[in-house]
Image (cartoon, helix red, strand yellow):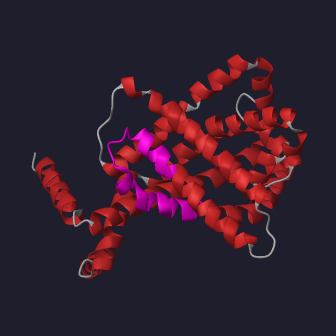
Amino acid sequence: MTRWTTSRLVRRSARSPAGRFVLRVARDLADLGLIDRGMTLAAHTFTSVLPILIVVGAVQSRLDTRTAAIFAEHMGFDAATAETLEKSLPGGAQELRATGVIGVVLLVIAATSFARALERSLRRIWRTPAVSLKFAWRWLAAVAAVVIGIAVVVATRIIIRDEGPLPVIEFIAEVVLWGALWWVASWIVVNRRVSLRELLPGSVLAGIGFAVAGRFGRVFLPPLLADSAQRFGVLGMAFTYIGWLLVLACILLIAATVGRVGYLTYSGRAWRHSASRLRVEAHVGGR
């Protein structure tokens, strides 16, 4: 009975353009394995990108003490909570600072795991083939683009304060910056096999999603992290922040998927992609 009702609902939805669009998005997200891919990206962000941000923040604070709380502000909590999170990171930012340049270089190399995970997700979404290791430079370039982009977003939050009409300006600026960040980073990791024009809709959606999530995160994340740290210590705080990174990763993957389906629908190629996919599945199923 449930299967019959679901099939009937799907058939009715497929009669309208909006229904077909939703069905294509739902099908692609199911094929992607949204939660699994999102958890992979979140874990790699926690072990790779966050330590880089903390090391950069520590170096910057030594050069200019006025910027000591930059990344604490970006993450949405005070300096004391940021210090607790720093201690929960694998390897620890303090040890990385102690090892000097070699430790930072090793950290950057390890950070390519995030870029590789992002590449695998985007290749799955856009159905592009894998590329050879001679293009491995793009992993470092993607990590650099993400770190620089986050730094620019943080600098924008510091320059534009929440007073008067400025919150609206800050939100628009964050949408533009986050969208540009993922636009460039996505183009790099897929090795330019997908055009910037095709990546634009998903990047705009990702920019909007990250800007909205940032607003909620700065309100709800600090008390959640503080409560986790009080109840379970550093480990609880780490799990809480990984959960927040999972939310952000899912926003990015959903935006990329919706952007792809939207672009293919707008360009009139959605039906051709669906038809070719059905032929492949029928060929495989007939074996």
In this orientation, which residue lies closer to the viewer: 107 or 161?
161
- Residue 228 appears left or right of 259: right
Question: Total marks drawn?
Answer: 0
The image quarter containing residue 282 is bottom left
- Residue 190 appears left or right of 109: left
The N terminus lies in which quarter of the figure? bottom left
Residue 1 in view in this figure: no
Please give the range of residues in magenta: 182-211
Q: Residue at x 68, y 69 (%)?
A: 169
The image quarter containing residue 248 is bottom right
The image quarter containing residue 96 is top right
The C terminus lies in which quarter of the figure? top left
In this orientation, which residue lies closer to the viewer: 46 or 227?
46
User: With respect to residue 46, does 182 lie above or below?
Assistant: below
Residue 52 in view in this figure: yes
- Residue 145 in the image: x percent, y percent? 56, 41
Q: Residue at x 58, y 36 (%)?
A: 144
Q: Residue at x 85, y 52 (%)?
A: 78
- Residue 114 appears left or right of 106: left
- Residue 234 appears left or right of 12: right
Q: Residue at x 89, y 44 (%)?
A: 66
- Residue 165 in the image: x percent, y percent? 74, 75
User: With respect to residue 63, does 163 lie above or below?
Assistant: below
User: With respect to residue 239, does 9 lie above or below?
Assistant: below
Q: Does residue 273 show up magenta in the picture?
A: no
- Residue 87 in the image: x percent, y percent? 80, 36
Q: Does residue 193 show up magenta in the picture?
A: yes
Main secondary structure along the magenta-highlighted residues:
helix
